[in-house]
Image (cartoon, grey):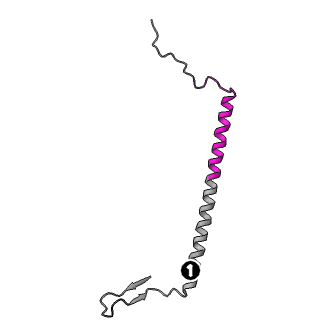
């Protein structure tokens, strides 16, 4: 990190807080970190896609079973709309 010394009459003289070594090593390290993060995000996205696809398949299977008549009266209203008379 570069900081500007305040109170110096010399103007904008910057000094490094820590010696980072050569600039090429830092860039290489950042590139590798970026690649690792990218690969991790791609793996997570693929896992989420697979989970959504499995859910979609399970729902379709349930709908197919219901359409074939496993429980045809499961969603019909069994009670009358009107109150019973005496």
For the stretch drawn in magenta, the main secondary structure is helix
- Label 1 sits on a secondary structure element that is helix
Residue located farthest toward the bottom when viewing the structure as drawn:
10
Q: Position of residue 32 (x, y in %)?
A: 60, 74
Q: What residue is shown at x 48% (from left), y 16% (from top)? A: 81
Q: Quadrant of the C terminus?
A: top left
- As displayed, is residue 50 above or below residue 61? below
Q: Residues within 10 Å of mark 1 (few under 14, many from 20)?
A: few
Q: Position of residue 37 (x, y in %)?
A: 58, 67
Q: Position of residue 50 (x, y in %)?
A: 65, 51
- As displayed, is residue 24 above or below residue 37? below
- Tell me the residue that label 1 is attached to: 27
- Position of 78 compared to 16: left or right? right
Residue located farthest toward the front when viewing the structure as drawn:
11
Q: Nearer the viewer, residue 34 or 84?
A: 34
Residue located farthest toward the top when viewing the structure as drawn:
86
- Position of 8 compared to 42: left or right? left
Q: Is residue 30 magenta?
A: no
Q: Position of residue 74 (x, y in %)?
A: 60, 25
Q: How many marks?
A: 1
- Position of 18 compared to 42: left or right? left
Q: Quadrant of residue 31?
A: bottom right
Q: What residue is shown at x 57% (from left), y 84% (from top)? A: 24
Q: Is residue 69 magenta?
A: yes
Q: Quadrant of residue 14?
A: bottom left
Q: Nearer the viewer, residue 45 or 18?
A: 45
Q: Quadrant of the N terminus?
A: bottom left
Q: Which residues are magenta?
A: 49-75
């Amino acid at each position: 990190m570069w900081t500007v010394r305040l109170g110096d009459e010399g103007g904008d003289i910057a000094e490094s807080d820590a010696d980072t070594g050569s600039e090429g090593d830092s860039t290489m390290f950042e590139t590798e970190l970026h690649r690792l993060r990218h690969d991790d995000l791609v793996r997570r996205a693929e896992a989420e896609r697979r989970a959504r696809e499995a859910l979609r398949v399970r729902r379709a299977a349930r709908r197919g079973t219901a359409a074939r008549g496993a429980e045809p009266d499961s969603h019909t209203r069994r009670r009358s709309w009107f109150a019973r008379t005496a």
